[in-house]
Image: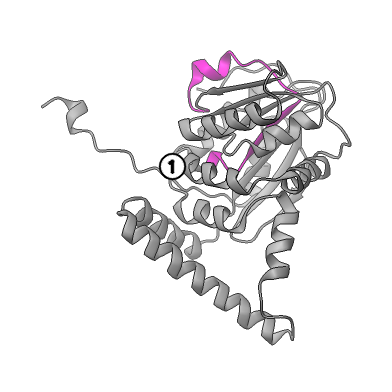
Amino acid sequence: MGLLAMEKKELRFEFGKNWAAFLSVLNDDRIAVAEASLKRALRVDTLQGKTFIDIGCGSGLFSLAAVRLGANVHSFDYDPHSVACTAELKRRYFPDSERWIVEPGSVLDKKYMEQLGQFDVVYSWGVLHHTGNMWQALANIVPLVGKPDGKLFIAIYNDGGTSTERWRAIKKLYVSSNIAVRWTILITLFTMLQLKAVVRRISRLENPLPVRDFREYKNRRGMSVWHDFVDWIGGYPYETAKPEEIFEFYRNHGFFLDFLQTGGLGCNEFVFAGAQLESRSVAA
């Protein structure tokens, strides 16, 4: 037997299949919320005439939001199902647009990254910590940020210490299990988390039902509570970083922090500005 025959299948969650299900609940309200979240973090009212790259485009929602805000968008993803989701959104909303490119690609592929050029906005929300080589991925996107006033908008899972290690074990169990075990994990954990939330709301003398929480969640980024939960449980490979580690990393690459929103055990959002960045090659 050759080495290829002996190679184990890589443990990796198929994000694109989950996002394909999300497209069934996508509507104009969710798209409008996604647009608003981009404008808030980037401190803009429009992206008219700007170039925007969506690294790990997933469902394609934020690529679509950027196109609607006027940007010329380049979307790529390692997962073929995610590429298909984004292509489907382009087909639905901008079928003949030359302002939106959708293709497969990997942020860890040096040759692919080198031929992309530079962009006014480099966007990668909740993606780079799932590549299996987060710090290399974080370095590989540096040359994509255009000068003199390009923006880098990323979201990276926070390092929660022992909580992070516990969730890493759960995620690894999930992706290595059969469909019955996966559904058992999902239903058990979702029920436990919702019951804890009910108790918390009752203790505050609030309505115990999750209606307001679900509405507020949707209003933050336009995403779905359930599909994001599946993404969270299944999201493996899984790496994390403390906010100061990300800040220090990009400061050493010539960026300064323009926006920060921390998220507990979830994602910390960062927008870095790279004024007067010098041209750089992709880090080896």
**Residue 145 seen from this side:** yes
- Dot 1 falls on a residue whose secondary structure is loop
Amino acid under label 1?
Glu
| Residue 147 position in % (x across, y down) | 78, 20
Q: Nearer the viewer, residue 272 or 44?
A: 44
Q: Looking at the rendering, which quadrant does residue 180 occupy?
A: bottom left
Residue marked by disc 1:
14
Q: Is residue 79 at least partly visible in the picture?
A: no
How far from the left and from the top, in percent, is residue 53? Answer: 67, 26
Residue at 57% in and 53% down: 228
Q: Give the residue displayed 70% in from the left and 56% down from the top.
A: 218
Residue 159: image location, x then y, percent: 55, 55
Left or right of 189? Residue 268 is: right
Going by the image, does 194 lie left or right of 148?
left
Q: Residue sitting at 48 percent across and 22 percent down?
A: 109
Q: Quadrant of the N terminus?
A: top left
Q: Where 240 sits versus 181, above or below?
A: above
